[in-house]
Amino acid sequence: MSKRFCEVCGSDTEHKEVMKQKPSKYGKSKKEQFKAFLDGFFSSSSTSIPGGASLELTDRYIVCAICGKATKENHGSEFQ
């Protein structure tokens, strides 16, 4: 955890990093989900994080340990 300024709390508080999956650009039908699977399977970018999720499919959030406010912080080209 790291100390950062929280706008809600108004002071420096402990924050943790959380990775969440981005919403799918594909629909909810089985056909669309199969397309999403194939797109991920054959993706030329095999860079992944230890959890096995591709960085292109995840968002990075910083969450305050006191109030729980989540702030999206995607830095770097891997999050684009």
Image (tube, rainbow, N blue to C red):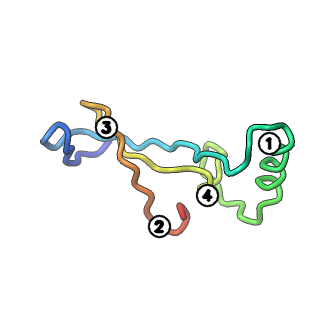
Q: CA distance from mark 1 to mark 3?
A: 31 Å
Among numbered discs 4 and 3, the one appearing first in the sequence: 4
Q: Nearer the observer, disc 2 or disc 1?
A: 1
Residue at label 4?
A: 56
Q: Nearer the observer, disc 1 or disc 3?
A: 1
Residue pictured at 78% horizontal, 49% vertical: 36
Residue type at mark 4: give it. Answer: Glu
Is residue 75 or residue 51 the one in the foreground? 75
* Labelled pair 1, 3 in contact (Cβ < 8 Å): no
Is residue 49 or residue 33 the one in the foreground? 33
Residue at label 3?
A: 69
Label 4 sits on a secondary structure element that is helix
Residue pictured at 66% horizontal, 47% vertical: 24
Residue at label 1?
A: 33
Residue type at mark 2: give it. Answer: Gly
Packing grade of label 2 (10 A; few <14, some 14-19, many >=20) is: few
Residue type at mark 3: give it. Answer: Lys
Determine which of the numbered discs, if any, sits on residue 76 in the image: 2
Q: Specify the farthest residue to the left.
A: 11
User: Would you identify the image quadrant in which residue 78 lies?
Assistant: bottom right
Q: Nearer the observer, disc 2 or disc 3?
A: 3
Among numbered discs 2 and 4, the one appearing first in the sequence: 4
